[in-house]
Image (tube, rainbow, N blue to C red):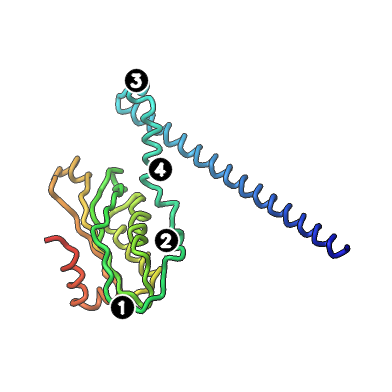
Amino acid sequence: MEYQHDIEINGEDKYLNICKHNGLCKKEKDSKDDTDSNKLSHIEKAYTTILGELGEDVDREGLLRTPLRAAKAMQFFTKGYKETTQDIMNDAIFDENHDEMVIVKDIDLFSLCEHHLVPFFGKAHIAYLPNKKVVGLSKLARIVEIYSRRLQVQERLTKQIASAISEALEPAGVAVVIEATHMCMVMRGVQKINASTVTSVMLGTFQDNPITRKEFLDLTIRK
């Protein structure tokens, strides 16, 4: 009987601990929701101010919900600040006796130039030489998404993607090339519609071995 009594008490303690934990989780979630709501409200007000300063009537029908829509859009465009490589890798790295080049090319990317807050967009090409470890191919595209959904310059974006893959997989080499069109060059400034920007980062064997580097570039860069 005493043993059963202990079980009941311990069981009740466990139940209370679960309830307490759930309560704390709910409070944390509610606090995060409140913070996100406040941030959205501040961004919405900022867009209202911007539209007004541009000479628009923010009370006309077409603009009534524009500041809120723009605020939500900006939060989506920069959602990469809330994500990390560790978050998306999970259990997607596998032991595999494969040491030949792995390439994923033509990964669509969309980002915002941090100088003018206008888009740049294009393709990312990624290759790595496994060192007994491979990763689910979709994760490479997810890494591109994490870093492109931030205020960026293309040079830094290219390096961040390469560094993230190198740190996660510890491969023999990583290569990343990005080809992009920048609307800050198309819509303003020099207004050159057909201009594109190509950046590359080569790590490990791709940097040290010109034959490996040439193989990657021949397989990815459009002529």
Residue 205 visible? The answer is yes
Quarter of image, res 53? top left
| Residue identifier under label 3 | 60
Q: Which of marks 4 and 1 is nearer the N terminus?
A: 4
Viewer-nearest of labels 3 and 1? 1
| Residue identifier under label 1 | 99
Q: Is residue 12 above or below residue 190?
A: below
Badge 3: residue crowd in 10 Å (few <14, some 14–19, many ≥20): few
| Residue identifier under label 2 | 85
Looking at the rendered structure, the kind of residue marked 3 is Arg
| Residue identifier under label 4 | 75
Quadrant position of the N terminus in the picture? bottom right
Badge 2: residue crowd in 10 Å (few <14, some 14–19, many ≥20): some
Badge 4: residue crowd in 10 Å (few <14, some 14–19, many ≥20): some
Q: Earlier in the sequence, mark 3 or mark 4?
A: 3
Numbered mark located on residue 41 in the image: none
Q: In this view, does 101 lie above or below 35?
A: below
Inter-mark Cα distance, 2 to 1: 23 Å
